[in-house]
Image: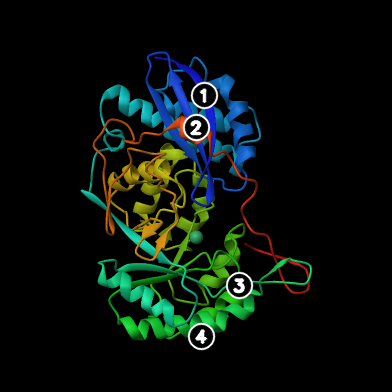
């Protein structure tokens, strides 16, 4: 069997773009993958175009060697755009391998450790009474791992620019998370995603404004280019960190795992380099007693790939899902993806069909193509840029 064709299928689902990659073989078997570099989709499509001549004619069963060639051949190794493209290719090759052998992808990764995949829910309720109502609703419906979203007092200035002042968010967020913990007691797992909007000093102040035990994890309070900055913050708080959704290889995870900076790995299978790279990161995390808390803000293909990963590793905590009693973002469109993982409350079932277990309606996808950059750009009141 050899690879005959590689195609990028851009589509818009719910409220964001999804970059689907389809790889066809000469035997009629094809695989689907998804790339995770949101708001850089055209750059990823360009990278896949660069890679395609190296893929045509290759044996799709040799996905490990193909990974090495795409990453290392051609000089200028790695980087977010290349590994996001490689991720989609690698996932599609796993889909092909599973279909060719007649087994679900988790069987290629060592078999199942668990029968279903535990999920966490997100509430984007503003910091206030509705936050507590949302979390109680989730708890009543069996969700006991809940992620909240920081206070986001965004406003538009006179020039129509979206304004966000990071420091103004921390007092209100800490206040309402403290009230939330008081309201729901010690048992639920509570975290907050700060979407790397803070400095080290702001993040430290935020943590210090909450009583001990308020949060079970703090997701990405600061940017991650500098592990030493995170180490400085690590010394200022005892709240476990959940970091890694932007990491584009095992080498980016390296300092965070080996120096004890992160306590949960927010690995993104559509950005880190696909299942080939994700399994290596998972093993490395296992050696350091770190559980995976996979990042999964995309569609059914990324979800299915991550479900097979989570099924096949001993160290999985909770998978992100964007469908819960408090959130329905439309990412798992059943008309576009008529076959996909089945969710039952805070669990996803592990598919037993050959390959990933996802079917995709390409004709329908063609009618809902990319929308231009949908990520907001934020500024502070003085006009300077701040992180989205
Ligand atoms: Mg996040």
The residue sitting at 46% across, 31% down in the picture is 362
* Residue 39 pos. (x, y %): 61, 48
The residue sitting at 37% across, 14% down in the picture is 27
Q: Which residue is mark 3?
A: 200
Disc on the earlier residue, 3 or 4: 3
Q: Which residue is mark 1?
A: 6
Please identify, in this view, whether the residue under mark 1 or under mark 4 is nearer the observer.
1
Find numbered disc 4 in the image and state the secondary structure of the residue it sits on: loop
Location of the C terminus by quadrant is: bottom right
Location of the N terminus by quadrant is: top left
Find numbered disc 3 in the image and state the secondary structure of the residue it sits on: helix
Q: Is residue 79 visible?
A: no
Image position of 90 with respect to 38: above or below:
above
Label 4–label 2 contact, CB within 8 A: no
- Left or right: 56, with 197 as reference point: left
Residue at the left extreme?
A: 115
Quarter where residue 152 is shown: bottom right
Image position of 184 with respect to 363: above or below:
below
* Residue 219 pos. (x, y %): 48, 65
Q: Real-space Cα distance between discs 1 and 4?
A: 52 Å
């Amino acid at each position: 069997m050899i690879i005959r064709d590689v195609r990028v299928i851009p589509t818009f689902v719910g409220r964001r773009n999804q970059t689907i990659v389809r790889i066809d073989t000469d035997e009629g078997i094809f695989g689907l993958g998804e790339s995770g570099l949101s708001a850089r989709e055209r750059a990823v499509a360009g990278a896949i175009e660069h890679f395609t001549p190296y893929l045509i004619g290759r044996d799709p069963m040799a996905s490990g060697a193909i990974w090495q060639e795409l990453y290392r051949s051609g000089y200028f190794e790695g980087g977010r755009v290349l590994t996001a493209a490689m991720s989609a290719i690698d996932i599609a090759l796993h889909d092909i391998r599973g279909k060719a052998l007649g087994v679900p992808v988790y069987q290629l990764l060592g078999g199942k450790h668990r029968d279903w995949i535990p999920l966490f829910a997100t509430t984007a309720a503003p910091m206030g009474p509705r936050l507590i109502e949302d979390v109680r609703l989730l708890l009543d419906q069996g969700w006991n791992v809940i992620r909240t979203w920081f206070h986001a007092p965004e406003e538009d200035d006179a020039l129509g620019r979206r304004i966000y002042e990071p420091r103004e968010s921390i007092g209100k967020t800490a206040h309402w998370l403290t009230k939330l913990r008081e309201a729901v007691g010690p048992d639920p797992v509570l975290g907050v995603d700060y979407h790397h909007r803070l400095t080290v000093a702001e993040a430290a102040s935020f943590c210090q404004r909450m009583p001990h035990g308020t949060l079970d994890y703090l997701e990405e309070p600061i940017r991650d280019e500098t592990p030493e900055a995170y180490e400085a913050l690590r010394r200022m708080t005892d709240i476990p960190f959940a970091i890694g959704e932007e990491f584009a290889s095992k080498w980016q995870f390296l300092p965070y795992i080996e120096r004890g900076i992160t306590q949960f790995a927010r690995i993104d299978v559509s950005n880190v380099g696909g299942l080939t790279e994700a399994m290596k990161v998972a093993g490395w995390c296992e050696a350091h007693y770190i559980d995976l808390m996979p990042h999964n803000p995309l569609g059914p293909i990324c979800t299915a790939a991550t479900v097979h990963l989570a099924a096949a590793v001993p160290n999985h905590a909770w998978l992100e899902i964007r469908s819960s009693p408090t959130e329905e973002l439309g990412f798992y469109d059943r008309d576009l993806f008529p076959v996909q993982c089945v969710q039952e409350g805070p669990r996803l079932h592990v598919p037993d069909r050959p390959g990933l277990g996802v079917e995709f309606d390409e004709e329908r996808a063609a009618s809902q193509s990319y929308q231009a950059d949908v990520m907001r750009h934020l500024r502070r009141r003085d006009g300077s840029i701040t992180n989205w």
